[in-house]
Amino acid sequence: MGRVAYVNGRFARHAEAAVHIEDRGYQFSDGIYEVWAVFDGKLVDSAGHFARLKRSLDELRIAQPMSEAALRIVLAQMVRKNRVRDGMLYLQVTRGVAPRDHPFPVPAPAPAVVITAKSVDHAAAEARAAVGAAVITVPENRWGRCDIKTVGLLPNVLAKQAAREAGAVEAWFVDDLGLVTEGASSNAWIVDQSGALRTRDIQANILRGVTRSRLLALAAELGLPLEERPFTPDEAKLAKEAFITGAGTLVLPIVRIDDSKVGDGIPGPMAKRLRRLYIDHARREADVQ
Ligand code: PDD
């Protein structure tokens, strides 16, 4: 983690940065977050992440803590102060600090803002992507508003831990219809038997991944067959390829689902191509949008 954090209007040494014990994020998970990938010191797909940030706040009726222009300046300062070239920015906004009581506090406190930055070792990430990763499937047990990027992530935490204990990097949630929704911190994709790229539609209870929508647009430009249509774990296991997308993983090939190899058990050509495509886009277009 970087050396400098931003907390409620101030830059602080990361080790000493702290929030109040009655922050509603801490007490009720009453807050939201956003994560940007940073390439060459610039934010990737920033407009999509800012739009989702605004939407998440609006859905929970938390006031915008500052204008997008002001926030962009603070995020740029965080990149600079932490000397991030390639990395990630994490922003969290909670409803603020108030004596513990479930309904929204009156008058509304100022939203509490925390930002952290960290560098990512892209060489290590590339090495991992070259081998591919495993996922497990777990029953969907999250609330019905996964389109809001809230800090209430306990089911995601438990699913991720189950994945780690199984030697996997991600857990795919499977809903009551027997269909994969998404990963604990990524969207789920396959290249199905017919060669089409498939990922769940956003009418479903999933986060509308910014990487997901960018990749759909990039793939459409290339005329690749695309279907925003759900798939079952069995379809995924029989698929030609599988992969996940997110600001953290970008495009990461999946080579094992539960106990089944996907394809030949090595990253497939489409996932490798799409990873390149997305990273090229990220380097070219970061903050030019
Ligand atoms: N996670 N689905 C879930 C549940 C997520 O938490 C994420 C992102 C995604 C992918 O969204 P995007 O492409 O906009 O990053 C899908 C972030 C990276 C996290 O929790 O750290």
Image (cartoon, grey):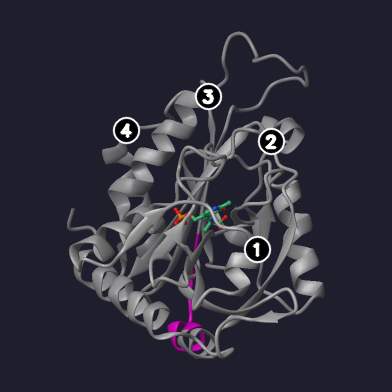
Residue 92 in view here: no
- 92 within the magenta span: no
Which numbered disc, 1 or 3, marks the residue closer to the eye? 1
Q: Which residue is mark 4?
A: 67
The answer to which of marks 4 and 3 sits earlier in the sequence is: 4
Residue type pointed to by label 3: Ala
The answer to which of marks 2 and 3 sits earlier in the sequence is: 3
Label 3 near ligand 1 (CB < 8 Å): no
Distance of mark 4 from mark 3, alpha carbons? 14 Å
Q: Is residue 41 above or below residue 123?
A: above
- Label 1: which secondary element: helix
Task: Give the image quarter of residue 102.
Answer: top right
Give the extent of the magenta segment.
117-125
Q: Which residue is mark 2?
A: 143
Which numbered disc, 4 or 2, marks the residue closer to the eye? 2
Query: Position of 66 compared to 15: left or right?
Result: left
Where is the N terminus found, in terms of image quarters? bottom right
- Label 4: which secondary element: loop
Residue type pointed to by label 4: Ser
Label 1 Cα neighbours within 10 Å, binned few <14 / some 14-19 / many ≥20: some
Residue 69 in view here: yes
Q: Nearer the viewer, residue 80 or 122?
A: 122
Q: Residue 270 location, x and y as percent?
A: 38, 79
Q: Residue 12 location, x and y as percent?
A: 54, 53
**Which residue shows up at 54% across the image and 86% down it?**
128
Q: Which residue is mark 3?
A: 110
Residue type pointed to by label 2: Trp
Q: Residue 233 shows which numbered tag? A: 1
The answer to which of marks 4 and 1 sits earlier in the sequence is: 4
